[in-house]
Amino acid sequence: MTSYKAFRIHRDNAQHSAGIEALELQTPDKGEILIRVQYSSINYKDALAGTGKAQILRRYPLTGGIDACGEVAESGDKRFKPGDTVIVTGYELSTTADGGYAEYLRVPADWAVPLPQGLSASQSMILGTAGFTAALALHRMETNGQRPDMGPILITGATGGVGCIAVNIFDGEGFEVHAVTGKADQQAYLEHLGAQEVLGREQVNSYHHALERGVWGGAVDNVGGKTLSSITRKIRPWGNIAAIGLAGGHDLNTTVMPFILRGVSLLGINSSGCPGEIREELWQRLATDLRPRHLDDILTQTVSMEQLPEIFEQMLAGKIVGRTLVTL
């Protein structure tokens, strides 16, 4: 047996611990593949799981990381052969199954998407779940009738992973983008990525009525809580809100008024449970028409597995801008 390194998360008697351990390599069963992981990324969910600040994992111990890209080392499925480069994001990674913070990852072949032409392995993980989620938000909004002529798209949490990629993607698709951030010093960065207007949280969060003046044609919300409550009241008729995150809270205090008087739609974005056919289609689009023009600027740091605990704490403290690539 060959051993490999993995970032393991434990919870014993309500005590959280995490760190790098050596594990024994397992041969893939029929229908599985073994991936030699090259890159992963850090998402808000990874930081919560890695620090134990939220009950993300549903069994212990597990290897962290909801993203992975690498080469197939062994295959128990005829769709993949050794040497193929594949992407795995979401599904049950780092919830009930081992995740991508490891030198090797064994997963069901159904979870893997071939790396599309036009993206390198590292670029796919600069995107990772964050980029895929931003693309899924656009896909669902467009499918539900969102068009640039309906008005500006509001993007909250705009300096985060999903937010900054969404700014770049929606701008590239011809939408006027209004970005919301609590980091006033990042205005120039967001404008560089494609935001036509940069707003502070206080400009978005206040409301007094069940319906306010319609300001935005639609929104991508990474925050939830009071922010999402306020946004529902300010979307123009027939606009869509893509609800992605809950960094500001999971409660939603709103009324039916925006939905029955303006036809506003609230779309839930569940990237981890996205059907395989849509997943593959969106990765193809991320390599072509939805590929962020400023991908190199969205990547703000590259770290090793040993640095994960430090970066998790920084992310939860709101000190991370853009995307962090993890090299294995």
Image: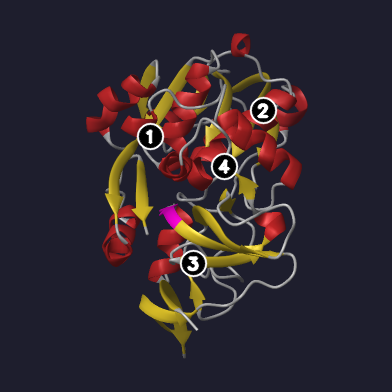
Residue assigned mark 2 = 141
Pick whichever of labels 1 and 3 is earlier in the sequence.
3
The span picked out in magenta is 38-42
**Residue plotted at (40% across, 19% down):** 194
Question: Against 127, is 69 above or below?
Answer: below
Dominant secondary-structure state across the stretch colored magenta? strand
Q: Residue furthest left?
A: 185
Residue 217 in picture, x, y percent from top left: 59, 18
- The residue tagged with tag 3: helix, strand or loop? strand
Amino acid type of disc 3?
Tyr
Please name whichever residue, 311 or 144, is drawn nearer the observer in this view of the structure: 311
Give the Cα distance between marks 1 and 3: 41 Å
Label number found at residue 201: 1
- Sequence-wise, the earlier of marks 2 and 3 is 3
Q: The disc labelled 2 sits on which kind of residue?
A: Met
The label shown at residue 104 is 3
How many callouts does the rendering have? 4
* Nearer to us in this view, 235 or 307: 307
- Percent across and percent down for residue 172 are 50, 18
Marks 2 and 3: CB-CB under 8 Å?
A: no
Circle number at residue 115: 4
Q: Earlier in the sequence, mark 1 or mark 2?
A: 2
Q: Tell me if I can see residue 103 in this picture.
A: yes
